[in-house]
Image: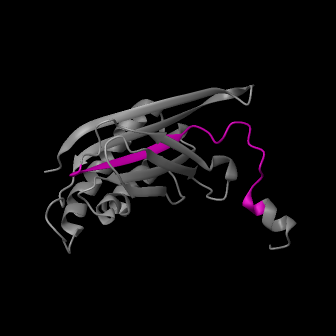
Amino acid sequence: MLEIRKILTTIEETRIDGGRAIENPIKMVAAVAVIKNPWANQGYVEDLKPKIDEYAPQLGELLVEELLKAIGSPDNVEAFGKAAVVGVDGEMEHASAYIHTLKFGNKFRNSVEGTSFLSFTNKRGGPGTNITIPMIDKHDDSKRSHYITFETSIGDAPRADEIVVAIGASTGGRPHPRTGDRHSDMKEMGLV
């Protein structure tokens, strides 16, 4: 059984950036679960797949539900990403196990009708470690305006035998984007 100690939803809404008002304020949301690491303190476990198959879909569904409560309609999501932080008694592979499977990622991608890959971070850390969620446009991974990052943390997580698993979404890209996109650069440089 998946042991969830804590759920956190963090919401940030940006209304002014660079001294200039944003016509449509940009909301970023992170939905985070703190779970018991099922492989902690067991030594090296060769086959992680049974626990991945059992828990990844549950985590995906739970986090999508929490995120959509905060952001509203799936249509509001323009950019998305995911992250995991494993406590110090776990392996990096334990953090990766849940977020790098379609059984987790597709719960999110399909719910918001995304077609891009989910950008990610996975790392090891202790309580209060920043949960860094990089995001990209849900339909166009070359759209620089939507290369954004959202961070949050939990003061008492992850404990040594826990994993923090998170998804993040944004209702827009960066405020006032002015850096163009990869396709324009490639044309300009004669690469297309």
Q: Nearer the viewer, residue 57 or 94?
A: 94
Q: Position of residue 162 (x, y in %)?
A: 24, 50
Of 96 and 78, nearer the camera is 96
The location of residue 65, given as percent across then percent down, is 35, 39
Horizontally, residue 95 falls left or right of residue 111, namely left
Picture quadrant where residue 26 is located: top right
Viewed as shown, does residue 135 lie left or right of 188?
left
Q: Place residue 100 in its image quadrant.
A: bottom left
- The image quadrant where one finds the C terminus is bottom right
57 is within the stretch colored magenta: no
* Quarter holding residue 32: top left
Identify which residue is drawn at 17% across, 57% down. Answer: 38
> Measuring 41% from the left and 38% from the top, which residue is drawn there?
67
Name the one closer to the observer, 151 or 70.
151
On screen, residue 140 versus residue 183, left or right, reads left
Whether 175 is among the magenta residues is yes
Residue at 45% from the left image edge and 56% from the top image edge: 121
Residue 98: horizontal and vertical position, in percent?
31, 58
| Magenta region | 160-183
